[in-house]
Image (tube, helix red, strand yellow):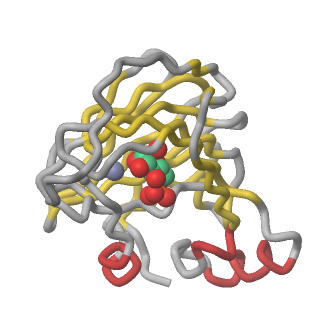
Amino acid sequence: MSASIELTDLPFGLLVDERGELRPATSKVERRLSQMAGMYADAEAERAAIADGDPLVYEVHQYDMPQHPGELVVCTTILHAGKVGEEFFMTKGHYHEVRDRGEVYYGLRGEGVLVLARNDAAETVPIGPGVVAYVPPHWAHRTVNTGSEPFVFLAVYPGDAGHDYGTIETEGFPQSVVARDGAVLVTRREQA
Ligand code: M6P
Ligand code: ZN
């Protein structure tokens, strides 16, 4: 870590609402289904949905921070409602590049599940408004919208954590969250 990095040494407040608006935000990311191709188990349904309008799956609004372990990045995620085949819309999911960095999520709107994986272990934590969910260091994490309205949450993580998507793209998560017979089911993922 460079000693010349400029740290944020003045306190400030951000405004967040249940729609996921963060004011001010310094960056916004939009992820369409085509930008996460290959992640859903039903490859045929995925292809058809991309051809049929390529839906917006989620947005991240962020207040960026210096990449320093003492800083904390704040962001919101707006994960839209929808399915690819029987699998609910989800984020790409990532490990932190610096593996021993944790994260906190706080549910603002809608219903979802935090899916976590580490080696052969897999866990899920339901999140709704008012729930604080903890992602311990070393766990890959992804969120899934299991409801019919946007699932919105706030996340806070260390400035130097970084996002490792490559490991997830190669290995996938051991679990999928699907709708079956009207119920939400966490299943062992069938590889596409
Ligand atoms: C949460 C945080 C962000 C992450 C976002 C979307 O808000 O964990 O760091 O970017 O979810 O998830 P992903 O980056 O895996 O697409
Ligand atoms: Zn993270």
**In terms of image quadrants, where is residue 110?**
top right
> Is residue 183 shown above or below 89?
above
For the point 15% across and 48% down, the residue is 137
- Position of residue 34 measured from the top left corner of the image (x, y, whole percent): 68, 76
Quarter of the picture holding the N terminus:
bottom left
Between 110 and 166, the one nearer to me in the picture: 166
> Is residue 78 shown above or below 105?
below
- Position of residue 53 measured from the top left corner of the image (x, y, whole percent): 87, 70
For the point 59% across and 51% down, the residue is 179
- Position of residue 59 measured from the top left corner of the image (x, y, whole percent): 64, 49
Residue sticking out furthest to the right: 52
**In terms of image quadrants, where is residue 165?**
bottom left
| Number of marks in the rendered image | 0
> Is residue 95 shown above or below 3?
below
Horizontally, residue 172 falls left or right of residue 68, namely: right
For the point 36% across and 18% down, the residue is 11
- Position of residue 112 measured from the top left corner of the image (x, y, whole percent): 51, 37
> Is residue 170 shown above or below 25?
below
Between 125 and 71, the one nearer to me in the picture: 71
For the point 26% across and 59% down, the residue is 96
